[in-house]
Image (spheres, rainbow, N blue to C red):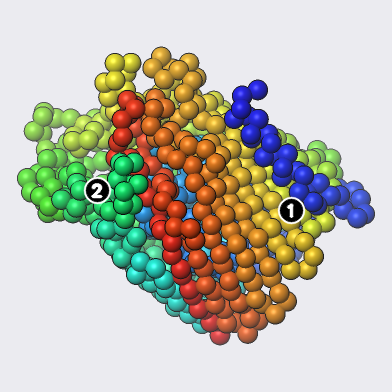
Amino acid sequence: MSSARKQACACVLMLLAVPGFAQTPDEPEEPESRYEDEITVVEKKEPSRTLPGPETAAREIAEIPGGAALVDAEVYKRGRTSTLKDALDFTPGVFVQSRFGSEEARLSIRGSGLQRTFHGRGIKLLQDGIPLNLADGGFDFQAVEPLSARYIEVYRGGNGLRYGSSALGGAINYVSQSGYGAPPVQVRLEGGAYGYLRGQAAAGLVRGRMDGFATLTHFSQDGFRDHSLQSTNRFFGNFGWRMEGDRETRFFVTSVKTDSELPGNLTKAQLEADPSQAAPGNLALDQKRDFNLFRLSNRTTLPLGPSSRLDLGAFWSNKDLDHPIFQVLAQKSNDVGAEARYERQGKRNVFVLGFSPAAGIVEDDRFVNAAGRRDARTADGETTSLNLDLYAEDRHELRPGLTLTAGAQLSRAIRDFDDAFLANGDQTDRQEFDGFSPKLGLMWDATSRASVFANVSRSFEPPSFGELVSIGGSGLLQLDAQTATTVEAGTRGHAGRSAWDLAIYHARLDGELLSLNDAAGNPLGTINAGRTLHTGIEAGIEVRFGRGLLWRQVYNWSRFSFADDPTFGDNQLAGIPEHFARAELLYETESGFYGGPNLEWVPDDYPVDHANTLFAESYTILGLKLGYRAASGFAGFVEAKNLTDETYAATTGVIADARGRDSAQFLPGDGASVFAGLEYRW
């Protein structure tokens, strides 16, 4: 066994050895039928059908034979709530690192979107069950607001089929407050290092059969690094109407205005000399990413009898992007989509059938970047995306405590480019991709509090225009869809004072979308790699000691590698550390005070290039959190991050072969910093 595998096994054994982890309940219980419980839940009648509460969502997640979790917003709101990392850092299997203390990040599940440190890919991102992805598969991190969510659902890998996701990474769904669950009025203010300021004003309302929720937030910061000023204003609102016969419709509106300076990547030498500096090229070109987003959507639930229902959804989004980088990208996009989802729930069976079409048009103009201003036009085209996804899933209880789940998705994707520039001849092109993604899973309730599961699934991901459109902006590269077969096994549950979530997976990918070079070192751009392997462990544990002490920890082991590649052999894929751990020890009192230290640990250096000649160094980050939450509605916190002022790369770019030379691929993490916040709910 390799040393890496020994370390991974040792970490799992360490988790299993924690007191209480393997504890059994005081009184053994026979497993009961899950579906009889589900019928009882339906009879309780959630206040909102379109925005179910976290208890209902948690019960549904517990039925999934694979990696899935619910993140309660009330937990992450105990500290700074600024980035996706703040919200998802203690979620097993999710790797998220901010690019420069900003909202844009590297977000990856099981190695999805491995090369992206911005404008995510490989995960279906949703708001209230309705996709936030553009029709080509990409998504913007600024389109979500952690403070507006009541909870977040995370479905890893093939378990995202619930929302029609066939991508390797699965699905993440932000679920908003409704008027039924939100306080009538809520205000929150956070501030701290590097000019950080975040504010929220929110309100919930119920009037007869109608309810509504609205939140307005502002975020700004000067940033730890030069040329990293950020400013984002967001409005999220929803209005629901419950009709006769438990029918419900809900309208959602989103408005985002965001401006972001981009400090760029540094060389390792620059990182070590002064991690707060900006890359010279980013300063010279005044690189930024600014956009306005407006989005309307609707969800409607129609009961079709005592045990079945039809859910309908639709959305329209409009985005206007101004993005000076190596050239100026000026893009106006319009995306529309719909979904029809039928669910029938019997005594021992749940059947789901869904159809989800989406289409998007992007007017893509590109110009020479003259110190951040538009100069001569370099490209002019229109890209069109069309996706058609038909999915079905059947969950059947073979006997009490043993459930078989089978599902599949048929996908068709079209990517069309209409060249209007014609400087290099007409580059108009059209590419079509078809995929079939089956899934088979089995779950056994070892006790009423713990389950064991296993599944095998197929994933399918056509390239987004970020991979397809050539650097100059004219013409499409000839690429195939990325596919994978993933085998997964694991367990989750709780016993005594402990709770756990553990999954082990192995994925064989064909045609992974990577930027590579040939054996002579010549760059090939983004191409379909040969066979690659993604193997990992996703582990989370919580243990309570006595009345007030809570230990929680997540550990991800991510071994991603080539498989007999003619250029890279069996090298490790670059971009994500093989070992990553987060831990927190928190003392809580009955009166509402809490506090304790936390840790982020990357124990080994990890490669920046696929040739494995340039590495980001290991690091340990220490933090401390103190706070108070009163039953009256008042809350406050103070949080210190990177107490030892460690100089480190939070994440990196990904290149094919650095040839052992230093390269501008490192994105420094923030230095020592302190943040504080106050919240009040009426």
The C terminus, quarter of image: bottom right
Q: Which mark is residue 342?
A: none
Give the amino acid type for the residue marked by disc 1 in the picture: Ala
Residue at 51% x, 30% y: name it: 560
Instruction: Say which residue label 1 marks.
Output: 499
Q: Is residue 220 above or below residue 84?
A: below
Mark 1: few, some, or many residues within 10 Å (few <14, many ≥20)?
many
Query: In this orientation, does residue 451 appear?
Result: no
Query: In this orientation, does residue 559 appear?
Result: yes
Camera-nearest residue between 469 and 357:
469
Give the amino acid type for the residue marked by disc 2 in the picture: Ala
Query: Please, what secondary structure does the residue beneath circle 2 have?
Result: loop
Residue at 51% x, 53% y: name it: 621
Camera-nearest residue between 590 and 393:
590
Residue 105, horizontal then vertical, whole percent: 41, 50
Instruction: Say which residue label 2 marks.
Output: 279
Camera-nearest residue between 181 and 545:
545
